[in-house]
Image (spheres, coloured by chain):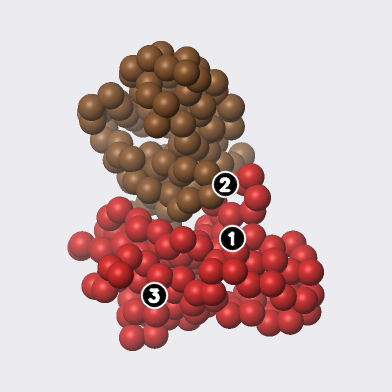
Chain colours: A red, B brown
Amino acid sequence: GAGVSQSPSNKVTEKGKDVELRCDPISGHTALYWYRQSLGQGLEFLIYFQGNSAPDKSGLPSDRFSAERTGGSVSTLTIQRTQQEDSAVYLCASSFALAGVAGELFFGEGSRLTVL
Amino acid sequence: RKEVEQDPGPFNVPEGATVAFNCTYSNSASQSFFWYRQDCRKEPKLLMSVYSSGNEDGRFTAQLNRASQYISLLIRDSKLSDSATYLCVVRGEFGNEKLTFGTGTRLTIIP
């Protein structure tokens, strides 16, 4: 499909394990964003990429969280030593940036993470 | 103070009514503003951008007041299909493409 693709769609893991969440943005979109949404809550900004660089990592909750983007395309969000409070839906979005200004965000369907 | 604040609602209004939401933002250097819509258990989707002069898209009107740092959304002749959560979104100052979402205002249209 032509939309933003995220995998896995659902992940159940045990406390203390590491998880990797993947995002395939829309082809040609230079900006990529990660958010998380807990049940009944708003979207919490985590990080955004412009190309392969991350100008703003201010939203990453702790040093257990990291993200990378390679080839200006796929991005991976890694959570080490997961905790129960990490349980949430992790949403990825991409955007076409013109003159450094990103336009409309197109979201994937999210990766639902449950930490037992 | 939160970067973007919205009344969480819920707003329960009868079909055909007019409803308005407000949103305030803390960073006076913010450059762009949007309203997104999120249906239950779905991803957010852009509803409309908000321009300084105000803009209208069918039954929806968005206004921006930079002096008071608030954004509004007006929905006229509401439909059952308008039931959703409406998210106020603010882009940071020039050079920062971070988009901050409000917690959303939940709207239910009653038949």
Cα separation between marks 1 and 2: 11 Å
Disc 2: CA contacts within 10 A as few (<14), some (14-19) or many (>=20): some
Instruction: Tell which residue pokes out farthest to the bottom in this image.
Output: A71
Per the image, the residue denoted by label 1 is A89
Name the subunit of mark 1. Answer: A
Per the image, the residue denoted by label 3 is A24
Disc 3: CA contacts within 10 A as few (<14), some (14-19) or many (>=20): some
Picture layout, residue A110 above or below residue B74? below
Residue A8: mark in rendering: none
Picture layout, residue A97 above or below residue B85? below
Q: Position of residue A79 (x, y in %)?
A: 64, 76
Residue A42: mark in rendering: 2
Q: Amino acid at mark 1?
A: Val
Which residue occupies the foreground of this view, B28 or B33?
Answer: B33
Q: Amino acid at mark 2?
A: Gly
B90 vs B48, left or right, is right
Cα separation between marks 1 and 3: 16 Å
Please state which of the two labelled residues, at mark 2 or mark 3, is closer to the viewer: 3
Name the subunit of mark 3. Answer: A
Which residue occupies the foreground of this view, B44 or B21?
Answer: B44
Is label 1 in a helix, a strand or a loop?
strand
Q: Position of residue B54 (x, y in %)?
A: 25, 28
Whether labels 2 and 3 share one chain: yes
Specify which label sits upstream in the sequence, 1 or 3.
3
Which residue occupies the foreground of this view, A95 or B12?
Answer: B12
Picture layout, residue B10 above or below residue B13? below
Please state which of the two labelled residues, at mark 1 or mark 2, is closer to the viewer: 1
User: Can residue A63 be seen by looking at this rendering?
Assistant: no
Is label 3 in a helix, a strand or a loop?
strand
Picture layout, residue B2 above or below residue A11? above
Look at 42% across and 41% down and name the residue there: B37
User: Can residue B92 be seen by looking at this rendering?
Assistant: yes
